[in-house]
Image (tube, rainbow, N blue to C red):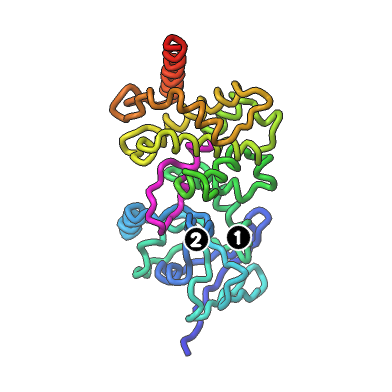
Amino acid sequence: MAKPHVILCSTGLSVDRPVLLGFAPAKLLHAYSFADVLNEDTGLGYQRRFNSQHSQDFRRYIRQPGASTIPLTLNLRPQEKGWKVDDLGSGQARLEIEASAGKVMAQVDCQHRLGCLGDLDIPLPFMCYVGLSLKEEMEVFSTINSKAKGLSTSLLDFHDAHLAGDLAKDRPEIFIALHLNNDPESPWCRQLDLGGESTSGMARRASLRTMQKAIKRFLAASRALKTRSPEKIAQIVLAFWRAIAEVLPAQWTTPRKHILTKGVGVYALMDIAADLYNEADASAKLDRAYFVNRLTDFAQDVDWTTSGRLKGLGGEGGVNEAADYIREMRKRSHLKVVSNG
């Protein structure tokens, strides 16, 4: 039977959390740790996608003379078996990991530094939390990386969703965006990029960050939260997007050629959704049929192509211009009907 790996560590506190501080070969840390990447199919995990180029760059750097790095941040998860920490007193401890334990340490902040070092004996410093829960681990990761270059803002939104005490109340825009992504009746179902990985093979049409910011515009323009619950508004927004996909099927199914699911299109359409919401009288049922009827009057008159009137628009100014153009086409359609009548 193979002997366990033993690492002598110092013990202490990182603010209020007990941690181990130590040094170990890169390949040992690589062998017994893992990155908990978000699986968008199951909703499990919380970290960004692995960037091989980023990791290769670090490998090239760390093998140079004079190279160094700040301590890797790990967590010995309480549910994982095959490890134990013996307190030796005087601020010292003995971390023992069974040879067959497998990956027992989560890479809280080091997945790209360790990713391509599985064959190197280079000594690396590490700080390891002892027994953080998954939620606590996610909080640490999100705090460390909230300003990190290259970290998906949609992934941070996903973290907010999981860490919020009452998501519908605290962050209604994320609650509604996730409802669009999760509801099987939604044309956006599994179509929003959350910043993780997916094995479904489906091409993502927009990011969670784009959708939640567009919904935030809708909420501000419609002031719907003053009279309706986030749950009810989520149903209304879903009804609007179902109507979009029904009225504009060709444009919806060819996203590369049309702007419906691109940032400027998502923002502008949520502005139009606010218009339609505000125009409804108190007795109106704001369901799919309501939005289909309103959209049918003008949507086909709009040039939704990426090579047409909306080509190259971006930023808030571009979104406002796109929304104004759609409103103008709606106005023209209405005047045409009146004159023909």
Q: Residue at x 57, y 72 (%)?
A: 80
Can residue 190 be found in the magenta stretch?
no
Residue 245: % across, % down: 44, 38
- Residue hosting label 2: 36
Of mark 2 and mark 1, the one earlier in the sequence is 2
Please identify the residue farthest to the right as the structure is shown.
227
Closer-to-camera residue (155/3)? 155
Please identify the residue farthest to the left as the structure is shown.
307
- Say the numbered circle drawn on residue 160: none
Q: Is residue 10 above or below residue 281?
A: below
- Residue hosting label 1: 134
Residue 125: % across, % down: 48, 62
Closer-to-camera residue (200/338)? 338
Q: Which residues are magenta?
A: 192-213
Can residue 205 be found in the magenta stretch?
yes
Question: Do the residues bearing badges 2 and 1 touch, measured as CB atoms within 8 Å?
Answer: yes
Q: Which quadrant of the structure image shows residue 114? A: bottom left
Q: Amino acid at mark 1?
A: Leu
Closer-to-camera residue (244/147)? 244
Please identify the residue farthest to the front as the structure is shown.
341
Residue 67 located left or right of residue 245: left
- Crowding near pointer 2: few (<14 within 10 Å), some, many (20+)? some
